[in-house]
Image (spheres, coloured by chain):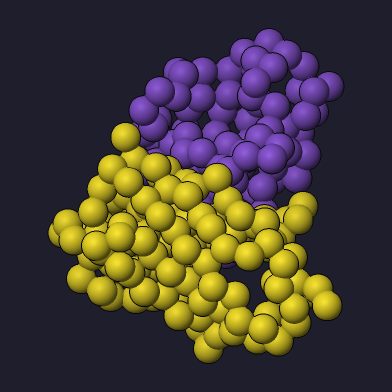
């Protein structure tokens, strides 16, 4: 059974750096073809893809946020870590990690973690 | 960048009726289109991938159709648990969602 769970702070101050951890089970990021993404959802709004890391350590980022994002993996711990710098109240959202299924450019997200709500406020 | 546009924003349907949701891509995405259901306070869950293939455990009252730029999610005989927000997705782009509410 594949599961993912996000962890991190619930509250960060403006200009601070957010660090979120996705801990997963049921698969390995050492396995060829495995990919994990981060996606966020501001309150009452739509989903926004943020970043992705692949089994071979390839990394991809949202064009609009790439200067603020880093993503890394720790395969020994089955974790993916996302950092976002210079946090702003507009970054208040629920942050999800999800396994990517499919291959190449044909992919979808399944399953998703439960999400972690993050508020940016002083 | 491809833009995904969903319509309508809100759909009011009576239980037992059919709901038809639309998703349009700004350019062809072939059949590379997925649908998700999100209930309040929950993470999205996969319904359909490859435009037409139901995910594991998804009841057959959910069906996806379309290719290129026009896609449809049809929910037949709406059940109480189907009232939710539905999103389409192509690669890293999601639509704005359609809320299916009780009429």
- In the drawing, does residue B103 fall left or right of residue A41? right
Q: Which chain is yellow?
A: A
Above or below: residue B48 compared with residue B82:
below
Q: Pinpoint residue A73: horizontal percent, then vertical percent.
A: 33, 69
Q: Nearer the viewer, residue A37 or A13?
A: A13
Which of the 4 image quadrants contains residue B94? bottom right
- Left or right of B14 in this view: A39: left
Q: Residue furthest left?
A: A32
Considering depth in this image, is A57 or B10 the residue closer to the camera?
Answer: A57
Residue A107 vs A48, above or below: the answer is above
Q: In which quarter of the image is residue B79?
A: top right
Q: Where is residue A59 in the image (x, y as percent from the top left)?
A: 34, 76
State the residue at coordinates (51%, 39%): B45
Where does the image place residue A66, in percent across and percent down from the top left? 51, 83
From this viewpoint, is residue B71 visible? no
Colour in which chain B is shown? purple
Residue B44 percent coordinates (x, y): 56, 43
């Amino acid at each position: 059974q594949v599961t993912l769970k996000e962890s991190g702070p619930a509250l960060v101050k403006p200009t601070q750096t957010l660090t979120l951890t996705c801990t997963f089970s049921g698969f390995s990021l050492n396995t060829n073809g495995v990919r994990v993404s981060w996606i966020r959802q501001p309150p009452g709004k739509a989903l926004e893809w943020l970043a992705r890391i692949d089994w071979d350590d390839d990394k991809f980022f949202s064009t609009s946020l790439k200067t603020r994002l880093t993503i890394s993996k720790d395969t020994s711990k089955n974790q993916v870590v996302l950092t976002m710098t210079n946090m702003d109240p507009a970054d208040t959202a629920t942050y999800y990690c999800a396994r990517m299924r499919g291959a190449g450019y044909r992919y979808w997200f399944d399953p998703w973690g439960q999400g972690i709500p993050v508020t940016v406020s002083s | 960048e491809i833009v995904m546009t969903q319509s309508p924003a809100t759909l009011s349907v009576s239980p037992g009726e059919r709901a038809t949701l639309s998703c349009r891509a700004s350019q062809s995405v072939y059949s590379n289109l997925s649908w998700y259901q999100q209930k309040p306070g929950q993470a999205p869950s996969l319904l359909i991938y490859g435009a037409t293939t139901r995910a594991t455990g998804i009841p057959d009252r959910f069906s996806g159709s379309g290719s290129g730029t026009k896609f449809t999610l049809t929910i037949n005989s709406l059940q109480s648990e189907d009232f939710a927000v539905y999103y389409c997705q192509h690669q890293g782009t999601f639509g704005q969602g359609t809320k299916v509410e009780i009429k």
